[in-house]
Amino acid sequence: MPDAAFTPRVFSGIQPSGGLTLGNYLGAMKRFVQMQDEGRFETIYCMVDLHAITVWQDPAALTANTRELAAFFMAAGIDPEKSILFNQARVPEHAQLAWIFNCVARMGWMKRMTQWKDKAGKNAENASLGLFGYPALMAADILIYHATHVPVGDDQKQHLELTRDVAIKFNHDFGVDFFPITEPVIEGEATRVMSLRDGSKKMSKSDPSDASRINMGDDADAIAQKIRKARTDPEPLPSEAEGLAERPEAKNLVSIYAALSDRTIAEVMPEIGGKPFSEFKPMLADLAVDKLSPISAEMRRLTADPAEIDRTLARGAERAREIAAPILQRTYEIVGLLT
């Protein structure tokens, strides 16, 4: 395998932690589908179940959540023939490369990770070693495919920066140009979807109020009802996007409307500017039902046949390993490991 021959390739993964929401769709999945269909990259998408077990998981729930997430990928538009779709545990090269990266990454790098600080908190002594080393596995997830681009949200930018640091240090330490310096892809409207009850908080499956979020399993009636009851302010919508700056609930709903209609906020403002929420909310509800209820219905159909989901993931893993195995073998040769 020639060094520095990098095929344009996208990798991204989502943890199978259950409770999929509109935030998962607009913040990640919709963009994944667009990148697949644009055809500019090979696209590899993964349920990162090894990451999920950095904190304790009920085994039966983890299995169910992984299948549900696979169904979400496919129902949202990921085609297992166009993209490679699999769960991480089926491709052992991820963990094997992660061990090498554990020996490349520095303790100081890991300690600076904000997610480590947030998740471990004052209980760091009792946190798992896997949680501490999570970014090295994330680097391996990306670089085992020589991925050149990764779509990331704001909360993952620091981990991608560490992936770049690992690639740079590996290449420098061994005098090679073997791993690409992966570029982030951050774009699109509504990449951070906020609560329907509090526009200052991110939409979350852990919010005690189900009315705060649209679940990807919600039916048409539930979707419409939640949007109609979403918190707003008494003023009509502004005519310009700048007028949303100090109105978090209004900005959130407009962002959702723009993203679902495949437009920017600036593009939708001439259509909705000046409307009271009594007119805008039904417009948003109709659009959300039109876009989301087919996904929910297809998810239910797919999850009713777990054996077919498992076969799809197994086929995806075979395709993933065709890329990953020679990259791992070359890595071993560079490091000096006999296999």
Image (cartoon, rainbow, N blue to C red):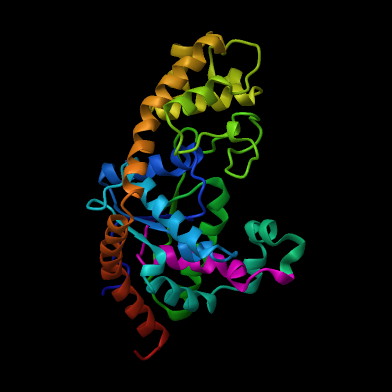
Question: In the rendering, at what x and y percent does residue 23 appear?
Answer: 50, 39
- Is residue 264 visible in this depiction of the protein? no
Q: Is residue 131 magenta?
A: yes
Of all residues shown, which one is farthest toward the bottom? 338
Percent from the top left, x then y, of residue 163?
50, 63
Q: Quadrant of residue 202?
A: top right
Q: Nearer the viewer, residue 143 or 252?
A: 252
Up/down of 240 relative to 322, above or below: above
253 up-or-down from 3: above or below? above
- Report whether 44 appears left or right of 195: left
Quarter of the image for residue 216 reads top left
The residue sitting at 47% across, 78% down in the picture is: 100
Q: Residue 88: give x, y in percent of width and height.
A: 40, 65
Looking at the rendering, the stretch of residues picked out in magenta corresponds to: 125-149
Residue 87 shows in the view: yes
Question: In terms of depth relative to the viewer, which is nearer, 147 or 43?
Answer: 43
| Left or right for 145, reference 156 | left
- The quadrant of the picture occupied by the C terminus is bottom left
Q: Nearer the viewer, residue 300 or 338?
A: 300
Q: Name which residue lies at 53% across and 79% down.
A: 103
The prevailing secondary structure element of the residues shown in magenta is helix
The quadrant of the rendering that contains the N terminus is bottom left
Residue ID at (43%, 31%): 219
The extreme left residue here reads 81
Say if 224 sits above or below 179 in the image: above
Q: Is 63 one of the magenta-colored residues?
A: no
Location of residue 182 in the rendering, given as x and y in whole percent from the top left corner: 42, 58
In the picture, residue 87 is in which quadrant? Answer: bottom left
